[in-house]
Image (spheres, rainbow, N blue to C red):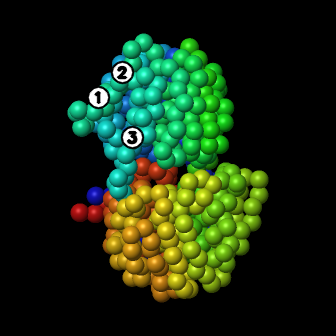
Amino acid sequence: MECFEIKGQKKLKGVVSISGAKNAAVAIIPAAIVAEGVSVIENLPSIEDVTCLMVSLDKLGAKCTLTDESTLIIDARKVKSYIATDESVSKIRASYYLMGALLGRFGHAEVAMPGGCNFGERPIDQHLKGFRMMGAKIDTSDEKIIKLDVDGRLHGANIYLDVASVGATINIMIAASRAQGRTVIENAAKEPHIVDTANFLNMLGANIKGAGTDVIRIQGVDRLHGGEYTIIPDQIEAGTYMICGAITGGDVTVKNLIPKHMDSLTAKLEEMGCSVIEGDDYIRIVAECKLWPTNIKTMAYPGFPTDLQPQITALLTAADGRSRVIENVWESRYQYIDELKKFRADITVNGREAVIEGGKELQGANVFATDLRAGAAMVIAALGANGVSTIGNIRFIDRGYANIEEKLLNLGADIKRINKE
């Protein structure tokens, strides 16, 4: 089993460049097959989820070609199959975007139930509600496969999401781009990768307005063509490296990001005593000071992102005093806390609230990543801990962080990838 071995308490200093956004890439890649053309996608993160989606698209008949580590050409002209039930589909959560893409293109889709990180109930009922309102008949009698069929072509509909689901907003938007008539999504999610996916679809010839607000209007078109598109920087990767700098008392400049996307995190880092310097496409974190406690509540964008909750919780163990974290998005996202306690962190969980008694020195430990962002939290804790730590299950980390050990090594971390029995 591959593990990370980290010797902690090395002050991180230097510059780290952020890759393309994982959450945008895993939506844009499936969205490319709703068009009958060739798409060139740039600034792609080199991560496992992207590899899985490329395999899935190849099996559907698309030709996926990486011209370099960050540029992918998708030739979707010869996609004939609407059945995506292979193992690569069931490995990751974002494979559910194949439902919207195949339904929009063919009026039919058979897609394996999505996999991905397990941190509680993550229903896709809002996705299916939207498809049903657009005329799809849905068969879930096989608990491992979802079958969707339309008599003729999807039609526009007014869809009110019961919760502002990111996945449902994107999936409905993809399908509606080729539906007949006008679709309105109300109570839509507003995250940056929703805007990025809408911009990509518009580049292909779609007519989508309002992405980034709570009402999105899509006028369906008959056909979409190919084109070239550059993915936005990864908000969560950027935040993770900012937190890595903070827990080590370092001086880290995170470049190739959009500072506005980081507002909720930079506000909290400033509350904790960090110096934050912003430029047009970079943020510098200087944490050569005592860290103060603060309280966090995760919320939909532009609130504090749930995907940075485990990382900020790891940082709060170094703050001198009591902090509280309230998880408002996912009900079981604290599964990683028992692993964090192995570093001798003092954390108590009661329902959706975690209370962190910070300021005690963390000690190196042998831990496991329980999911993608929990894995990042283990890396952060290990960087701040006294002694050597090993982190297992790093396949979770590889799903969402491109070249993480190389980037940390360049900042001065003592980290290596090892094989452990």
Mark 1 vs 3: CB contact within 8 A: no
* Residue 409 horizontal/vertical position (percent): 53, 63
Would you place residue 69 above or below residue 131 in this image?
below
Neighbourhood count class around disc 1 (C-alpha, 10 Å): few under 14, some 14–19, many 20 upward: few
Query: Mark 2 or 1 closer to N-term?
Result: 1
Question: What is the distance, in whole Å, between disc 2 and disc 1 at their CAs?
Answer: 9 Å
Q: Do the residues bearing badges 2 and 3 touch, measured as CB atoms within 8 Å? A: no
Tag 1's secondary structure? strand
- The kind of residue tagged 3 is Asp
Q: Amino acid at mark 2?
A: Asp
Are dots 2 and 1 in contact, CB under 8 Å? yes
Q: In the image, what residue occupies the spot 52% across and 29% down?
A: 174
The disc placed on residue 407 is: none
| Residue 329 point in image, percent of width and height | 47, 57
Residue under the point 37% across and 77% down: 341
Q: Which residue is mark 1?
A: 139
> From where the camera sits, is residue 376 visible?
yes
> Is residue 296 or residue 342 the one in the foreground?
296
Q: Is residue 86 above or below residue 410?
A: above
Q: Is residue 14 left or right of residue 130?
A: right
The label number, if any, that marks residue 149 in the structure image: 2
Q: Is residue 47 above or below residue 282?
A: above
Query: In the picture, which quadrant includes the N terminus?
Result: bottom left
Q: Residue at x 62, y 43 (%)?
A: 214
Q: Residues within 10 Å of mark 3 (few under 14, many from 20)?
A: few
Location of residue 64 in the rendering, given as x and y in whole percent from the top left corner: 46, 27
Mark nearer the N terminus (2 vs 3): 3
Query: Who comes first in sequence, dot 1 or dot 3?
Result: 3
* Quadrant of the image containing the C terminus: bottom left
The secondary element bearing badge 3 is classed as helix
Q: Is residue 77 left or right of residue 199?
A: left
Mark sitting on residue 125: 3
